Amino acid sequence: MRSTRLVIATAALALAAAACGGGSTGGSTSGGTTAPGHSGFTPPKLEALKSLGAGEGQVNLVAWAGYAEDGSNDPKVDWVHPFEQASGCKVNTKTAGTSDEMVNLMKTGEYDAVSASGDASLRLIASGTAAPVNTDLVPNYKNVFQGLKLKPWNSVGGVAYGVPHGRGANLLMWRTDKVTPAPDSWSVVFDPASPYKGKLTAYDSPIYIADAALYLMATKPELGIKDPYALDDKQFQAAVDLLKQQKQNIGEYWSDYTKAVQSFKSGDTVAGTTWQVIANLVKADKAPVEAALPKEGSTGWSDTWMVAAKAKHPNCAYKWLDWIISPKANAQVAEWFGEAPSNSEACAQTSDKGFCDTYHATDETYFSKVHFWTTPIAQCLDGRTDVKCKDYSEWTRAWTEIKG
């Protein structure tokens, strides 16, 4: 299942914004020759693989827990060994607990591919650690949902820097026996006069500042927030102030999903941020909870398999990228991990035939309300050039201050 995913960064990010999606879904070639993004970011000039050759016999991966299962956790959950048999590439996986760890591991040059979240992918692109991906060499890419292709966290100037793995939303969950009426807004966790003081929960990461910013987008339009990851001084301070106010009502912050499950089951927590998989597990244990996407929308994640610029086994890396987004493997990992698959044909392969409905896999209207995690940087991701935005190091310092 999902491990702690987001980095507590300590150094300022020296990268600039990636472009919004658009353009052809065909093969990527040279990252340095693409048009810069709306903030002027041009990545280092790197060439994507031009043709697929024979596998090198192995591939070294950096992955989130649950993304490269080989049967060791559950004999019935194994998409690694079938890949090895089909490709001739032995899989060596290093499980990472945070995005910061992923970035550092990839910079060693010892790994060929990584399952990067949006708070890591831009750093990998800007530092020249990740290369453009020639999607023409990834046949299953053609069946990836259009809503996941060429997005700000996985492309620059219409050039893909990886293949989408899956996606999910950060939802609002509540105990139906304690919280009435059923909430349809994040106000239930941000209202300073909340009747649920001490029983609320929030995700424990600096990136949670974006959740406050998202709420302010809807409730305080005069702040002019257009992107919850692009906050100038005034906007950022408003989000921080809201979170400091919220802190008085928080019973506990969470990053370990198993603890979140237990807290909702016991009733120690009655409302707060959750993932669909947490809601499923709590419901499976007969606790009275419901989860929904509030009217303001939400934040969320979309992970990307990226190839190292200095990959020692690039052919096996490409074979892995194609395998992990193939219908059967993508269905397996989505069900095991708890997220919507990226391949449009994966839904027909899930063991639970209602799985894709539960995770809104084909509902682009639903996901249009999700603001996927993206690294906050000084050059505003919303396109503004007359101000500077707060980068992730400043988000980190503020989060430490918020929690006290």
Image (tube, rainbow, N blue to C red):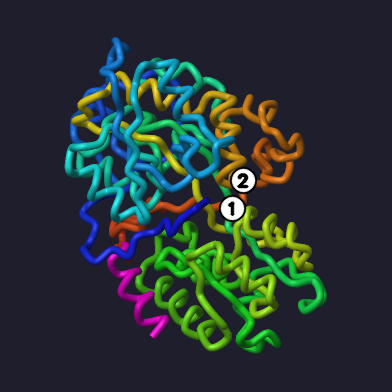
Q: Quadrant of residue 402?
A: bottom left
In terms of depth relative to the viewer, which is nearer, 295 or 292?
292
Residue indicated by mark 2: 367
Image-based side of 16 in relation to 237, left or right: left
Res. 233 mark: none
In terms of depth relative to the viewer, which is nearer, 347 or 192?
347
Residue 293: tell me if it is visible: no
Q: Secondary structure under badge 1? A: strand
Q: What residue is at 42 percent from the left and 38 percent from the top?
A: 304
Q: Amino acid at mark 2?
A: Phe
Q: CA distance from mark 2 to mark 1?
A: 8 Å
In terms of depth relative to the viewer, which is nearer, 383 or 370?
370
Location of residue 116 in the rendering, given as x and y in whole percent from the top left corner = 38, 44
Depth-wise, is mark 2 or mark 1 nearer the camera?
A: 1
Residue 364 among those drawn in magenta: no
Q: What residue is at 76 percent from the left and 39 percent from the top?
A: 354
Sequence-wise first label, 2 or 1: 1
Find out whether the residues at labels 2 and 1 contact each other: C-beta distance under 8 Å.
yes
Q: Residues within 10 Å of mark 1 (few under 14, many from 20)?
A: many
**Is the residue 404 above or below the residue 367 in the image?**
below
Q: Amino acid at mark 1?
A: Ala
Image-based side of 227 in relation to 159, left or right: right
Residue indicated by mark 1: 169
The residue stretch that appears in magenta: 392-404
Q: Main secondary structure of the magenta part?
A: helix
Q: Quadrant of the C terminus?
A: bottom left
Q: Secondary structure under badge 2? A: helix
